[in-house]
Structures are given as C-alpha cells and as structure tokens.
Image: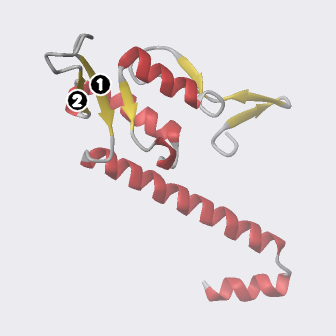
Amino acid sequence: MQGGHSEVTSGEVTKEKVGCLLCAQQFDVMEMQDDLLRHLLLQHKLVIADVKLVAHFKKYLDYWRQRFKDAAITEFCSVIKTNTKETDVEPEESYYLLCDALPEDKNLRVRLQQEKLHFDGSSVYVRILAAAPKKTLQFTMSLL
C-alpha cells in the first residue's frame, strides 16, 4: 500500500475500496467519497458531521462499520426527527448524525489526526534528512 491510497502491482494502480457502513455497497475511497456520503444520506439517512476534518477517512469508516455490527446505530448517533409538527404534510423521518459530540467519535477523530501528524511529520523529516549533505545529516542526528 503506498500513501494509504492505492496499491501498485505490475505497474498498475488499483483503487482502494471501502464498504458502506451499513450495507455491502463498495466505493473508491478517494474518487467516490461524495458518492458514499450521498449513499449514506439517501439510503440509510446517516450523516457524518465535519467529514472534511476526519484525518483518515477509510480508517474512520472501517472503525464505525465494525462498531455498527456490535450495536444499533442509535447507540452511537444522535437522532434527528423531521416533519414532527401536526401541520407537516410529509411523514416523520429519522436521520442519524455521527459526530464528535459522542466521546467515542471524538476520541477516534483525535487518534486518527495524531496518527496522521506523526506519520506526516516522520515522512517530512526523513525526506529532509535524505536530501541533506552528510555533514548536516550527522549534525542533525546528534540533535536527536
């Protein structure tokens, strides 16, 4: 796996797939993120809050897919009811909001962000060292 996004085999790049949290439908995690979010909303009435702030979306989805197998969606999501007034013409519907108001979700988001920062920081550091002259490399190493 390179960069966590695709796998190179025989010179070909294969796309990394991720399954829906609640059914078997598959999506390309990089190219079809909007399609996956639309699917979650329209088919399952599930909204993931602040998705752009999730550091590693595939790991986030993998985590919640497993948790949703363990317990009902209502154990983890806020329920938002629509059309609840007597004057509403449409039937009442329930939508599910997965957000960092749930401590488990917040902890997951923080952990994924820390992993990303740690990985990205290490990668940048290694690239800097690899590009540095030998003298600078030895000096830099002695500072650690």
Which residue matches tag 1?
95
Q: What residue appears at the point 58 percent right and 59 percent down from the top-left corner? A: 119
Q: Looking at the image, which residue is at 68% across and 70% down? A: 125
Q: Which quarter of the picture shows residue 21? A: top left
Q: Is residue 31 above or below residue 42?
A: below
Give whichever of discs 1 and 2 has the lower sequence position. 2
Which amino acid type corresponds to the residue marked 2 in the rendered image?
Answer: Val
Residue 68, by quadrant, is: top left
Q: Secondary structure at mark 1?
A: strand
Q: CA distance from mark 1 to mark 2?
A: 6 Å
Residue 28 versus residue 128 in the image, above or below:
above
At mark 2, the secondary structure is: strand
Q: Is residue 55 positioned above or below 35 on the image?
A: below
Q: Residues within 10 Å of mark 1 (few under 14, many from 20)?
A: some
Q: Residue furthest left?
A: 86
Which quadrant holds the N terminus?
A: top right
Examine the rendering and report whether any part of residue 60 can be seen. Answer: yes
Which amino acid, mark 1? Answer: Tyr
Mark linked to residue 143 = none
Q: Which mark is residue 79?
A: 2
Residue 19 seen: no
Q: Quadrant of the C terminus?
A: bottom right
- Residue 136 is situated, as x and y percent measured from the top left of the image, at 79, 86
x then y, percent, for residue 35: 56, 23
Residue drawn at (57%, 31%) of the image: 33
Query: Where residue 25 sits: x, y (%)?
Result: 51, 15
State if disc 2 and disc 1 touch (CB < 8 Å).
Answer: yes
Which residue is at the far front? 87
Q: Nearer the viewer, residue 138 or 38?
A: 38
